[in-house]
Image: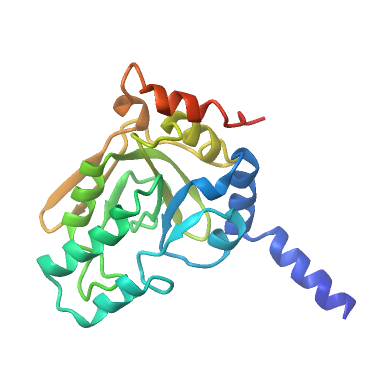
């Protein structure tokens, strides 16, 4: 029994997602106020304690119901209505190049996604138009990119401070680019996207965030 407990404890100690989520949680005064999109409805969701959207549909009936639809404009529209309709503050996405040194994100077939083919580039165009900007990257089991909503009422810079000071996080100065279907969608780094004068509500709410130690 003692060996089993020790083994489980050791696994938790070295679990990439748990370690990251624990750090992020420690930097947010109230993680439940943040909405996070990530296609891995497990350790991050339970450890971080934020509102969570699973774009693969495991814990999202509106997305799960899309699996039976053919790919096309209707599916894209319904997917985006659910994901962006919840006004996410953070999007965590795999860098499908599987290279921690690449700022280019291919959009290959994702067998967990409700889309039968590669993730439509229109999804990334909508993410960009919504206001998601590139924050930073880190390597867990796979390279991961973190996107931050520049218009978050909680303060985009405060979210950057919470999520992108995680040990091992790094940045591509030029941002990242999703590519597919012969096109590309560029996400500039957050600093280039923030207005010089953030709105008063964002500044007021953002002042409650604890700076990283």
Q: How many marks?
A: 0
In the rendered image, residue 74, in percent from the top left (x then y), is placed at: 13, 68
Q: Going 40% across and 44% down the picture, which residue do you hit?
A: 89
Q: Between 158 and 166, which is closer to the camera in this rendering?
A: 158
Please identify the quarter of the rendering in which residue 121 is found. Answer: bottom left
Q: Between 146 and 59, which is closer to the camera in this rendering?
A: 59
Q: Going 34% across and 17% down the picture, which residue do you hit?
A: 197
Q: Going 33% across and 56% down the picture, which residue do you hit?
A: 97
Q: Going 59% across and 50% down the picture, which residue do you hit?
A: 20
- Judged left or right of residue 177, residue 6 is right
- Judged left or right of residue 68, residue 17 is right
Please identify the quarter of the rendering in which residue 38 is found. Answer: bottom left
Looking at the image, is 149 positioned above or below residue 99?
above
In the rendered image, residue 99, in percent from the top left (x then y), is placed at: 39, 53
Residue 187 visible, this angle: yes
Please identify the quarter of the rendering in which residue 46 is found. Answer: bottom right
- Judged left or right of residue 118, residue 97 is right
């Amino acid at each position: 029994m003692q060996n089993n407990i020790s083994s489980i404890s050791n696994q938790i100690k070295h679990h990439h997602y748990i370690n990251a989520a624990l750090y992020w949680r420690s930097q947010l005064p109230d993680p439940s106020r943040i909405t996070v999109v990530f296609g891995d409805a497990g350790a991050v969701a339970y450890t971080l304690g934020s509102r969570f959207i699973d774009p693969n549909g495991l814990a999202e009936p509106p997305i799960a119901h899309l699996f039976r639809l053919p790919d096309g404009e209707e599916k894209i529209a319904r997917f985006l209505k659910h994901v962006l309709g919840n006004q996410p503050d953070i999007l965590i996405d795999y860098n499908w190049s599987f290279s921690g040194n690449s700022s280019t994100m291919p959009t290959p077939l994702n067998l967990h996604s409700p889309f039968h083919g590669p993730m439509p580039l229109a999804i990334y165009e909508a993410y960009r138009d919504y206001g998601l900007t590139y924050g930073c990257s880190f390597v867990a089991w796979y390279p991961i990119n973190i996107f931050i909503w520049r218009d978050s009422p909680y303060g985009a810079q405060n979210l950057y401070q919470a999520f992108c000071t995680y040990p091992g996080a790094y940045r591509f100065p030029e941002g990242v680019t999703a590519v597919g279907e012969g096109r590309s969608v560029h996400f500039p780094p957050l600093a280039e996207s923030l207005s010089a004068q953030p709105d008063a509500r964002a500044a007021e709410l953002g002042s409650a965030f604890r700076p990283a130690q």
